[in-house]
Image (tube, rainbow, N blue to C red):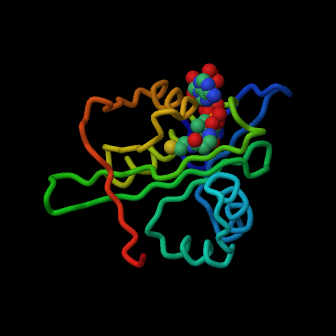
Amino acid sequence: MPACGNEAHGQGPGGEKVTYVRKAGPNDATTLSKMNNEFNHLRIKPKDIHKKLNRGSEIVLVAEVDGKLSGFACAQIMDSFCYTKPYAEMTELFVRATSRRMGVGKALVGAIEKELLSRGVSHIHILTGMKNKSARALYEKLRYSDHKERREVLYDKNMKS
Ligand SMILES: CC(C)(COP(=O)(O)OP(=O)(O)OC[C@H]1O[C@@H](n2cnc3c(N)ncnc32)[C@H](O)[C@@H]1OP(=O)(O)O)[C@@H](O)C(=O)NCCC(=O)NCCS
């Protein structure tokens, strides 16, 4: 698994591609905005992305395939007095349609894991759709356990509506 700044090689339909995973920087804000729109269908202004990247409360990694930004992953660390150890949640994972099935998602998850381990966090949660076959196949390949048996309900509320 590549850590940030390391390379991974994957065989795409066009031959050998080089995937490079690194921390997102201010110059990535415009492409992150476009990729987030492709993924979450939300238009967040690059300047707002820039501000949030600067806050540093979120781990944001990007993957370049042959030098072109092709995906990103985000994680946040939860550290409560109620538990002995912190844990992290990988909140976003996205690979552009043209770069899928080349190992980019795997490289991003691997790099998020290494980054978390380097910060002393060894437990990671991921919430994904039951019907998201690609994501579930990826997480299962990477030895994540599912908890379908858990009888929990996600509640949410828009407190302004
Ligand atoms: C899920 C996603 C990130 C996977 O990224 P990816 O770069 O295509 O994944 P990888 O190439 O690293 O796949 C690694 C392994 O995962 C499994 N996998 C990934 N996509 C798969 C698919 N569509 N069908 C079956 N298995 C799949 C395979 O085992 C694959 O290994 P293989 O190609 O050697 O068979 C990508 O499809 C995506 O961005 N989807 C839309 C966003 C999304 O749903 N994100 C997850 C939110 S929690």
Q: Is residue 3 visible?
A: yes
Q: Quadrant of ligand 1?
A: top right
Rendered position, 70 above or below 132: below
Q: Quadrant of residue 52?
A: bottom right
Q: Is residue 4 left or right of residue 87?
A: right
Q: Residue placed at 79% from the left, 49% from the top? A: 67
Q: Residue placed at 68% from the left, 61% from the top? A: 32
In this orientation, which residue lies closer to the viewer: 116 or 69? 69
The residue most toward the front is 161
Q: Quadrant of the C terminus?
A: bottom left
Q: Is residue 35 left or right of residue 132?
A: right
Q: Residue placed at 36% from the left, 55% from the top? A: 119
Residue 128 image position (x, y, % from top left): 46, 41
Residue 24 image position (x, y, % from top left): 61, 61
In this orientation, which residue lies closer to the viewer: 63 or 98? 98
Q: Quadrant of residue 30?
A: bottom right
Q: Is residue 55 left or right of residue 87?
A: right
Residue 9 image position (x, y, % from top left): 69, 31
Q: Residue placed at 61% from the left, 46% from the top? A: 94
Q: How many numbered discs sit on the rendered protein?
A: 0
Q: Is residue 108 visible?
A: no
In this orientation, which residue lies closer to the viewer: 95 or 160? 160
